[in-house]
Structures are given as C-alpha cells and as structure tokens.
Image: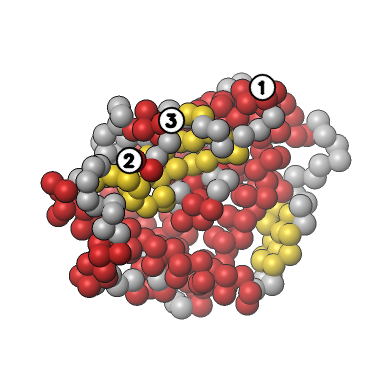
Amino acid sequence: MSFAFVFMCAVESHASVLLDRVVAIVNKEVITWSELYKMMEFEASEQVRALSEEERLKMFRESESVFVGRIIDTRLHLHEARRLGLDAGPEEIGEAVENVKKKYSMTQADFIESLKHEGLTLDEYKKRLTEQIMISKVIGHEIRNKVIVTDADVNNYLDNNKEIFSGGDAYKIRQIFFRKPPAEEKRTLEERALQIVDRLKAGEEFSSLAMMYSQDVSGKSGGDLGMVKKDYLSKEFVAALSSMNAGDISAPFWTDNGLHIIKLDTIISEKNMGVVKDEIRKQLSEEQFMERYKNWIDDLRERAYIEIKL
C-alpha cells in the first residue's frame, strides 16, 4: 500500500477537512489545501514516510505555514518571469530532460518509471521543469547578474578581519539550529534533525533547508556563520569539526543553546590564502545576492495581493 494512499485515507477520515479548500490567494491565483499537502508529501523523506500516520500528519501540520510561504514565493517568481517575458520553450525542456537521463544513465522507459515512483506523469514533470527554468531565469535576470564583488572588496574584507586570518585555524561554517525544547521533546527533535541530515545526504541544498528550518538569524542567509576562528568556537563545535573535511555535514549535536547541524565549507589557514580569497569572494557574493533577493521578494510581496487562510 503506497504512502500516498495511506496519507489520503487518513485525510479523508477527517470529514471537516476539504481537500480543495483555499489556503492562500496570490493576486488572482488560489493555493489549495490539496496542492499544499501534495507538495509536502512529494518532498517527504523516506524517514518521514516511515513515521506513523499520526506523526506524519502532525509533522505536515507543523510545516503548513512554511510550505505555504514557499508556494507563494514560487507564484510571485513565476508572475514576475511572465511579466518580463521570460519563458522556457519546448527545446529547453527537452534538453533538460535529456541531461537528466544522461546524468543518471537512464533510458526513456527508466525515466518514465522513476517519475511514476515519485508520483508524477511526464506532463507534470515537464510543467515543474518549466517553472524551475523560468524561476532560474528571473532570478538571474533580476538579481544574480547584478551581483559584483571586486578584488578591492575582497582585500577590504581581509583588512577588516585580520584576526581571523592570523595565528591558528579558522572555519567557514553553515548551520541549521534548533532551540532547546522541553526535556520530553528532545527525542522528537533529534529524530527530526536526523531526517534533515538524511535529506542533505540525498542531495538537498544546505542553504535551502537552513532557510526553511533553522531557528536562528543565520537561517535567513542559508545558515551561513561566515568565517569563525577556532578559538572562538565552543568545545562541542570543535569536537564536531575535528573529524570533518571541507564539504562534510555533521551529525546533529547538542550545546547549551540547542541542537546543531553544521556544514564545513572551508578550513582556513595562512597556508591557503588563495583558497581563502576565493571563499571570501563567494561569501561576499552570496551576502550581496541574499540582500538583493530579500529586497526583491519583499517588493514583490508588497506589490501583490496575498491572503493566507490557514
């Protein structure tokens, strides 16, 4: 019996819930409850699918507002792309599909079967692909192509942060942070964090999940903590980092403040200043991109009619 069937049966057992009720309106488009839950179901990890029916529904309910926000932003991206005349033609879609098949060494039959496993038809997949390409185009046109970091910017950052780059190692780190819950909820939080680690290992972007789940201010910038000197880190962070290489993701670990998952982007030392400058350029580019993106999406939201009915 499929997860989708079990899920829908559980939903239908609640007579008060209508699958097509409106949960939000963006300009003249509606977002339905069924669309919201289909998105959450599609993105659920194997660990979430293995939870009991009650636990799954509870987790979905807790995530409703986050996912509604994501759907709203997606609609705003697409509205702006159409306004600017940015579209994805059949040739682009076909090329993207062929690239996916080539990357995973799939025949057409393999590809169709993999879509079925994900609960998608080929037309539904192409529609999602079209939207992804349009969103990529509008973000590139409006934000990414306008981000400029000069050599002077990099050198100024070095001059203003000399203490980080002299005497001892430092790290460029990202984190997903959860505030410490009541004692009886610690186990549940640990399980949730492990599910996120599994999603990261399966290839999901750390920055995206940090923006979605992290409960500290760094979440707004994809969990980026910047460059931190080893001497300034807590013993729990140092212990976690001691066995990590650049690119690694830690197991969840506790500090006095809460539960952390970290990604080590770069180990910084005086011996690798060329690498350090590249990382500084990337960091400054991302900071500029995130600031521009936030201002842009805030402006889109201000100019749009948005009503949330959760």
Rendering quarter of residue 18: top right
Q: CA distance from mark 3 to mark 2?
A: 12 Å
Residue 52: image tag: 1
Rendering quarter of residue 144: bottom left
Residue 236: image tag: 3
Residue beneath disc 2: 230
Which numbered disc flags the more N-terminal residue, 3 or 1? 1
SS category of the residue bearing label 1: loop
Identity, as a three-letter code, of the amino acid under mark 2:
Lys
Is residue 24 among what the camera can see?
yes
Is residue 114 among what the camera can see?
no
Q: CA distance from mark 3 to mark 1?
A: 33 Å
SS category of the residue bearing label 2: helix
Which numbered disc flags the more N-terminal residue, 3 or 2? 2
Of all residues, the one furthest to the right in this rendering is 16
Mark 3 crowd level (few <14, some 14–19, many ≥20, 10 Å Cα): some
Image coordinates for residue 53, horizontal then vertical, percent: 69, 25
Query: Horizontally, is 164 left or right of 202 in the view?
Result: left
Vertical placement of residue 101 versus 23, above or below: above
Identity, as a three-letter code, of the amino acid under mark 3:
Glu
